[in-house]
Image (cartoon, rainbow, N blue to C red):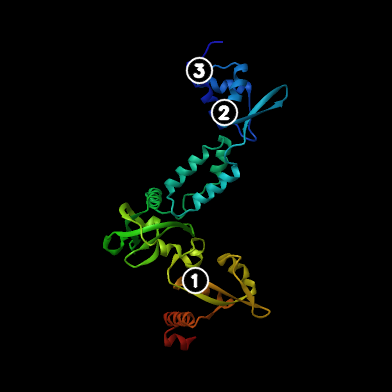
Amino acid sequence: MPKGANQKFKLYRLAQIMCEKTDETHYLTMPEIQKELEKYDIIAERRSLYESLKDLEEFGIEVEGERSGRGYRYHVIGRQFELAELKLLVDAIQSSKFITEKMTNRLIGKLETLVSQHDAADLRRQVFVSGRIKTMNETVYYSVDTIYNAISQNKKIKFQYYQWNVKKEPELRHGGAYYHISPWGLLWDHENYYLIGYDSRAEQIRHYRVDKMLHILLSEEIREGKEEFQKIDMASYSKKSFGMFGGKEQSVKLLVENSLAGVIVDRFGKDVMMIPADADHFTVSVDVQVSSQFISWVFALGSQAKIVSPKNVVNQVRKKIEKLAEQYALPIENRREN
């Protein structure tokens, strides 16, 4: 049998064909494999193909053959990722606000190359990126890489930080001055990525939204704040800071209706201690960074939850209630009408 012009690429193309065209439920017969190879100007005899399919195992590609009628059909088994695992990764990527729409589509496209064309189409059917709230900062991916490099090299970083103004335009904070921070970790919270770092000027640990950081540069200065960072528990950091809003950390005691036990567990974890107060309520003490966001979270639970201590936090709640009552108070003439 005459050989094709690209015969030397036979094994490579065979691997490509089997990975793209077959999976757990899709197969190719030997004649179909030969036909696919011919598209690349490669001629292969049956006997040589049997050996080549075995050789694919050297590349980590396991091909299984099974009888189908009078002949056999073949497919790739045991891929590096199962389809269900890739679906989880796709869901995580498309729901991440800090990843831009363009980058989301690019990453998902790369994941699709890990499965057959059939499974890739299945993955694509579950993708709903357009219309989701996504960051517009295309440099996030590289920002994360720079931060990790700084951590591994024990270096500080400097960057500019922005916020949105009422014109929906990015506005640099601190007049565009650079922040000089010692990076110690990255934290994922509520679909956003945060840098946890030490601010030597303020002498405290602070966090910054990575997608709002611009022009990140590696510094030659050695990181500071190791002792301060070691005092915090990264696993519980986001539990204590509601919406990543900072505040003074305190132990706050809540009186909660039994029906909200699930809400408390979801927020603070199963290790939290819930002590029965009466037949319908329990008390729970949680370590939180007391902020307006935390107080608003308690407000959202309505009459089913109440802060009972410490006094200074209770007073903060009362002041907030007074301000809200004043803000939404009806004019005197309207009160008379109602």
Identity, as a three-letter code, of the amino acid under mark 2: Glu
> What distance separates the C-alpha of mark 2 from that of mark 3?
19 Å
User: Percent x, y for residue 276?
Assistant: 65, 77
Mark sitting earlier along the chain (3/1): 3
Badge 1 local density, few (<14 within 10 Å), some, or many (20+)?
many
Identity, as a three-letter code, of the amino acid under mark 3: Gln
Q: Nearer the viewer, mark 2 or mark 1?
A: 2
Mark sitting earlier along the chain (2/3): 3
> What distance separates the C-alpha of mark 2 from that of mark 1?
54 Å
Above or below, 67 against 259 in this view is above
Badge 2 local density, few (<14 within 10 Å), some, or many (20+)?
few
Quadrant in which residue 207 is drawn: bottom left
- Asked which secondary structure carries label 2, the reply is helix
> What distance separates the C-alpha of mark 3 from that of mark 1?
67 Å
- Asked which secondary structure carries label 1, the reply is strand
Q: Which residue is mark 1?
A: 288
The disc label shown at residue 58, or none: 2
- Asked which secondary structure carries label 3, the reply is helix
Q: Judge whether residue 106 can be spotted in this image.
A: yes
Q: Nearer the viewer, mark 2 or mark 3?
A: 2
Above or below, 171 against 30 in this view is below
Going by the picture, which residue comes out furthest to the front?
Answer: 227
Badge 3 local density, few (<14 within 10 Å), some, or many (20+)?
some
Mark sitting earlier along the chain (2/1): 2
Q: Judge whether residue 169 can be spotted in this image.
A: no
Going by the picture, which residue comes out furthest to the top?
Answer: 1
